[in-house]
Amino acid sequence: MSWEWFGDQDYWASRLVFQRMLAAIYLVAFVVALNQFRALLGERGLLPIPRFVREVGFRRSPSLFHLHYSDRFFFAIALSGALVSAALVAGLADGLPVWAHMLFWTVPWVFYLSIVNVGQLWYSFGWESLLLEAGFLAIFLGPAHVEPPVLVLWLLLWLLFRVEFGAGLIKLRGDRCWRDLTCLYYHHETQPMPGPLSWYFHHLPRPLHTVEAGANHVAQLVVPFVLFAPQPAATVAAGIVIATQGWLVLSGNFSWLNVITITLAVSTVDGHLFPMSPPTPEESPLWYRAVVLALTAGVVVLSYWPIRNLLGHGQIMNYSFNRLHLVNAYGAFGTISRDRHEVIIEGTDDQVVSADTTWREYELKGKPGDPRRRPHQIAPYHLRLDWQLWFVSLSSRYGSRWLPELATRLLAGDELIVKLFRRNPFPDSPPTFVRARLFHYRYTTPRERRETGAWWVREPVGLVIRTCTLAADGKAVAAGSPD
């Protein structure tokens, strides 16, 4: 049997760039975990991992932390994942034997899978599964001295197709504004975490927003099929994906969702377009070829569920059909909010709450707070508390498991929790009372912006957490005071 078909040296440079970019995303993901896990998931976190692993078995959430958990162990896992990822970015694994190269890439996948599977709602985002699925396929791409295996390149293409086409279908089947091309009238203002340019995107002429929405349908419903065409058509299609995802990077903050989609598209680009010359390839081991064949067969079998989901009437998005997060369903923004609401957490050190009480805000790092503060560029970094508070602004039930504990920790002046915020209004001693109010936000008009210097106009519309204080047992309780 001839194995000439197995590798394609034309994608040698594409593979190399893909591997570097994916490793960089892994690095960001592990740095995020290092910076935030103690407050969110640690032994004293809002949703502690030790409690989770007692209630949920290994089969339901495969993770190294079922074997042992301590904050030190989590830190060691996340730090090791970051160091290995940095080594992969630097290309230190490129010259290794095939088996060692595969082992090198397996380490960050196993470590990040272990984090995601105990991460609970803090890790419930589609880009976590996307990173794990792409990371798993990367294990089998091989080092620089062997040809990129064609089958794995096709599996990456199949993943990119599901990401783009799934997102296109969920829009077409979802909110009516996607069908009448008006969703972009609202999206730049109501998206979870606006970026520094989002205000300007929102104020583009409405005909351009219509073009944006129409172009999105073309990019996600038509272009994905062209990705399977011969070159150079496939490279042109990949270029369109990269351009549209780059537009999303400029217009908002979506963690590493857009960056990893761009990374997947890079694997489809003709390698001759990169200024790198491939070496003379070595013959790949027979066992490696057998493993790639087995991988392909496994993905084909697992593809039944996402294909059924794409073709079915009740399409779901960002769903994993197995605990290893392989061959998942993807999609985003099937529904667009028309109005923006923000949860604003406030505290006071007054001993009694009255109508004259002065409340001070806990400023979040990414989401809007002070109307005069310009939104920051956060992505590809992921601010997990900020994102979850966006869901709470849609419905308070999203915070039912952790918001009361958050209030308790703020009243206690917990340093781990306070570090999740951009500004602590009580640096010397914790507040005596806290509350969370819901505000309606809208962008200022260009005229309002010139006159006031503000990016937002806001007004209070309700309460998320009523005024509370610490009880004798150290838990937050309603204060029975006017809000």
Image: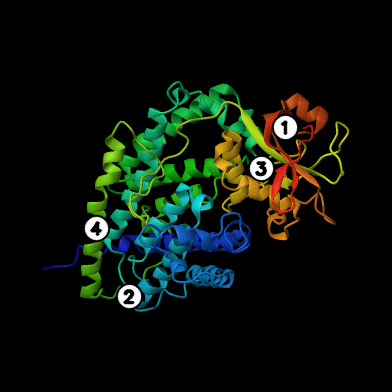
Residue 321: % across, % down: 33, 49
Q: What amino acid is found at the position of numbered circle 2 in the picture? A: Val
Q: CA distance from mark 4 to mark 1?
A: 50 Å
Q: Is residue 275 visible?
A: no
Quarter of image, res 295? bottom left
Label 4 to label 3: alpha-carbon separation? 41 Å
Q: Are marks 3 and 2 in contact (CB under 8 Å)?
A: no
Residue 367 is labelled as: 3
Q: Residue furthest front?
A: 472
Determine whether the residue tagged by mark 2 lies in a helix, strand or loop: helix
432 vs 185, left or right, is right
Q: Quadrant of residue 479?
A: top right
Q: CA distance from mark 3 to mark 1?
A: 12 Å
Give the class, few, some or many, for how many residues have Cα within 10 Å of label 1's Cα (few <14, many ≥20).
many
Where 459 falls versus 290 (above or below)?
above
- At 55% from the left and 29% from the top, the residue drawn is 337
Compared with 274, 158 (above or below) is: above
* Residue at mark 1: 456
**Which of disc 2 and disc 3 is earlier in sequence?**
2
Say which label, 4 or 3, has the lower sequence index: 4
* Residue bearing the label numbered 4: 298
Closer to the chain start, of discs 4 and 2, is: 2
**Distance in Å between CA atoms under marks 4 and 2:** 21 Å
Residue 455 lies left or right of residue 34; in this view the side is: right
Mark in front: 3 vs 2:
3
Image quarter of the C terminus: top right
Q: Is residue 405 above or below residue 109?
A: above
Q: Cβ–Cβ below 8 Å for labels 4 and 2?
A: no
Identify the residue at horizontal 49%, vertical 53% (top origin). 120
Task: Tell me the tag on residue 98.
Answer: 2
